[in-house]
Image (cartoon, rainbow, N blue to C red):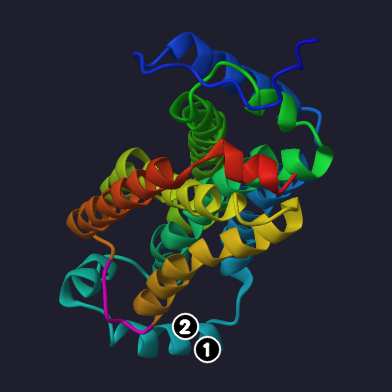
Amino acid sequence: MTMPNTQPRRSQSRKLDWGIVNTIARRDLAMLLRSKGVLLPIIVLPLLLQVAMPAAIGLLTPSMNAAQEMQDLQRFLTMMPEQMKRQFATYNEAQTLVVFMLVYMFAPLFLILPMMTASVIAAGSFAGEKERKTLEPLLYTPATDTELMLGKVLSAWIPAIVVGSVGFLIYSIVVNLASWETMQHVFFPTAMWGVLIVWLAPAAAALGLGTIVLVSSKVSTFQDASQLGSTVVLPVILLVVGQAAGVLYLSPGLVFAIGLVLWAVDAVVFWFAVKTFRRTEIIARL
């Protein structure tokens, strides 16, 4: 009697099959839409960062106590680079506060959106599937390790870019409407934000995703993967602190340079992930 083959099916060396990659990505996206644990953070975070916080700043600025808040802001601006000081020289105190907060301070915070979206989806796609016991059938398909990982990577990276882009459009509308009383004109988006959305945000999403890919094969639960993946926001915190301390200025050139560094880091992370990804190791931990 012939015993059934219990080893994962491995294809011979062949060209990458994008049909298989697309099938895996669509499968994961369909599962995403049914997972409240994945969808909830993706919904709540944009509402907080792209709607509630900028609306509060824009609407409340005209009624703020200028004697207190504006004095603190002026002391803050004395530490800023000369280029930023020249830009703010054309604004009154309330306008300065709005532009400083909504254009500069929110720029690095915005990167949390694509980073965390990619991280949460990837955690649900890798570690989450192990926890739900839905990963094993996929590991026994004819897909190569590269096709399997690439399908899962795209199922997280593409939604992160979409969420970031839609969030940017919503943020632009909210910022201009909420700040109209103060600014009296459409002042957002700026050139720096254009570079951030097109160049830096996709790189940030890839960094969050790559981190999860590396840790997911080592952990067994969605919560563990999410907690480890949350460490990717540390560079964002450094950018916020850097601007608050006046040691850097997010110009289009600097944002492009930061993106270039992140893409280089992403390339190394994903190269290492491809080299170390083995379905047999994942199966051993199921």
Residue 226 image point, x, y percent: 66, 56
The amino acid beneath tag 1 is Ala
State the SS at label 2.
Answer: helix
Q: Which residues are magenta?
A: 245-249
Residue 35 image point, x, y percent: 80, 35
Residue placed most toward the observer, 70 or 149 = 149
Residue 97 in which image quadrant: bottom left
Q: Which mark is residue 70?
A: 2
Dot 2 surroundings within 10 Å: few (below 14), some, or many (20 or more)? some
Q: Which mark is residue 152?
A: none
Whether residues under marks 1 and 2 lie with C-beta atoms below 8 angstroms apart, the answer is yes
The structure residue drawn at horizontal position 80% and vertical position 10%, both measured from the top left corner, is: 1
6 to the left or right of 181: right
The amino acid beneath tag 2 is Met
The structure residue drawn at horizontal position 47% and vertical position 54%, both measured from the top left corner, is: 111
Residue placed most toward the observer, 81 or 58 = 81
Residue 66 image point, x, y percent: 53, 82
The structure residue drawn at horizontal position 62% and vertical position 26%, both measured from the top left corner, is: 8
Residue linked to disc 1? 67
Tell me the distance, in whole angstroms, between the alpha carbons under discs 1 and 2.
6 Å
